[in-house]
């Protein structure tokens, strides 16, 4: 999966978000990487490029825009 943007969330938040994303068939990956400087007890939910309608749903679920994934 090509990585376009991500959100950093706690593991507790990730559980609910993963269920919601899966139920809506939105593609994502869970990533823990030193490249992203993720704090302990948190994880990145990473997304590929999404069409505008799907991105709007993701943006609403996370409460804002995602962070661009580093190249």
Image (tube, helix red, strand yellow):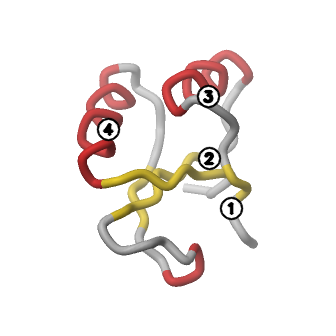
Mark 4 or mark 3: whose residue is earlier in sequence: 4
Q: Do residues under tags 3 and 2 come within 8 Å of each other at their CB atoms?
A: no
Q: How many marks?
A: 4
Secondary structure beneath label 1? loop
Quickly name the residue at label 3.
59
Looking at the picture, tell me which residue is in the foreground, 38 or 69.
Answer: 38
* Residue ID for mark 4: 18
> Which residue does the image show at 24% across and 42% down from the upper left?
15
Q: Where is residue 29 drawn, in percent x and y? A: 43, 53
Q: Where is 35 relative to 18, above or below?
A: below
* Residue toward you, 49 or 62: 62
The secondary element bearing badge 2 is classed as loop
Q: CA distance from mark 4 to mark 3?
A: 14 Å
Q: What x and y, as percent, mark residue 27? A: 47, 38
Q: CA distance from mark 4 to mark 2?
A: 15 Å
Residue position for label 2: 48
Is 71 on the left-hand or right-hand side of 66? right
Pick whichever of labels 3 and 2 is earlier in the sequence.
Answer: 2
Q: Counting residues from the N terminus, which is met first, the one under dot 4 or under dot 2? A: 4
Please, is residue 52 above or below residue 45 in the view? above
Q: Determine the CA span between mark 4 and mark 1.
A: 19 Å
Nearer to us of marks 2 and 1 is: 1
Between marks 3 and 2, how big is the CA–CA gap?
Answer: 14 Å
What residue would you read off at disc 1?
69
**Residue at 70%, 26% in the rendered image:** 51
**Mark 4: secondary structure:** helix
Sequence order check, earlier mark of 4 and 1: 4
Q: Residues within 10 Å of mark 1 (few under 14, many from 20)?
A: some
């Amino acid at each position: 999966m090509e990585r376009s943007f991500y959100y950093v969330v706690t593991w507790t938040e990730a559980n609910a978000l993963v269920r919601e994303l899966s139920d809506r068939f939105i593609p994502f990956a869970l990533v823990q990487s030193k490249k992203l400087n993720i704090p302990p007890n948190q994880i990145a939910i990473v997304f590929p490029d999404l069409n505008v309608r799907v991105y709007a749903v993701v943006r609403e679920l996370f409460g804002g825009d995602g962070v661009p994934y580093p190249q």
